[in-house]
Image (cartoon, helix red, strand yellow):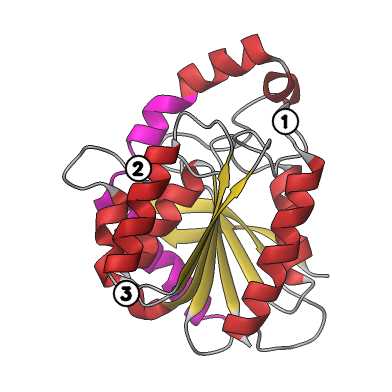
Amino acid sequence: MPQIEIEVPAADGTAEAYFVTPEGSGPFPAVLIFMDAFGLRPRIMEMAARIAGQGYAVLVPNLFYRDASGPLVEPEEMLDAEKRGAAFGRLVPMIKNLTRERISADTAAYLDFLAGRDEVADGPAGIVGYCMGGRNALVAATEHPNRFAVLASFHAGGVVTDEPDSPHLGAPNLTAEVYFGHADNDGSMTPERIKALEITLAEAGVEYTSELYEGAPHGFTMSDTAMHHPEAEQRHWAVLLPLLERTLS
């Protein structure tokens, strides 16, 4: 399976990225993956390759390209609670730098890159986000509604806030089918916030599914971290792959 580490045009420069396609000439439907806060690494490449293996051209950009390139954290920092806290101390300013305006501009650039590739089929893309990437994937889909057929977000935080530009308030713009898989006991997405998201999606007439993964912590899909929950990860694959097939085929 062709796997390429490349640089792609972004709004304020170039972003490191993984670009993975199936065997064959295609063209293949596009899937954009928005990473978690720990950045591009072997686990993210592995997940991109699994999705690509189902028949998609998959792009995973470094969302933090304005602030950092290369490895963002060491493997032991993702497995040790104390070291993970220190790592987040470095990452939080980068997360906060990802404003709605920047995510919107970057997303347009990533989609234009995909549209210019011979391996990529015409038509709307899919977008999949994890942790902070789940929040930013929602922003991307609300800012560019006609360019996405499906949005899948897993253990996302910051989707519902008290700010006037809270990501969930863009729901009336959505044209994509939407799936949210929420972590249990997640301080960044409490039951009250999940309910607020669901009410907003329903009132906007969005075709959506919102599910709680009971017993699964924030970050449950990431097998290289201490938050990995094998059963919840497998449930996420069992939902995600058929969802992409149904909406992008």
Cα–Cα span, label 2 and label 1:
23 Å
What residue sits 50% from the left and 44% below the top?
Answer: 156
Judging depth in this view, the residue of 208 and 53 nearest the camera is 208
| Marks 2 and 3 in Cβ contact (< 8 Å) | no
User: Magenta stretch mostly in which secondary structure?
Assistant: helix
Compare marks 2 and 3 and give the one earlier in the sequence.
Answer: 2
Are there few (<14), some (14-19), or many (20+) residues within 10 Å of tag 3?
Answer: few
| Marks 2 and 1 in Cβ contact (< 8 Å) | no
Q: Is residue 104 above or below residue 55?
A: above
- The residue mark sitting in front, 2 or 1, is 1
Judging depth in this view, the residue of 29 and 248 nearest the camera is 248
Q: Is residue 73 above or below residue 30?
A: above
Are there few (<14), some (14-19), or many (20+) residues within 10 Å of tag 2?
Answer: some
Q: Secondary structure at mark 1?
A: loop
Q: Which mark is residue 181?
A: none
What residue sits 42% from the left and 34% below the top?
Answer: 67
Q: Give how far across and how far down residue 201 sits, in percent.
A: 34, 63
Q: Is residue 109 above or below residue 124?
A: above
Q: Disc 1 designates what residue?
A: 225
Q: Disc 2 designates what residue?
A: 98
Tell me where the magenta segment starts and ends, as one range.
Answer: 91-119
Residue 189 makes an appearance in the image: no
Q: What amino acid does circle 1 point to?
A: Thr
* Residue at the far left in the pictured view: 164
Q: Disc 3 designates what residue?
A: 205
Cα–Cα span, label 2 and label 3:
28 Å
Q: Magenta span has 196?
A: no
Are there few (<14), some (14-19), or many (20+) residues within 10 Å of tag 1?
Answer: many
- Quadrant of the rendered image containing residue 215: top right
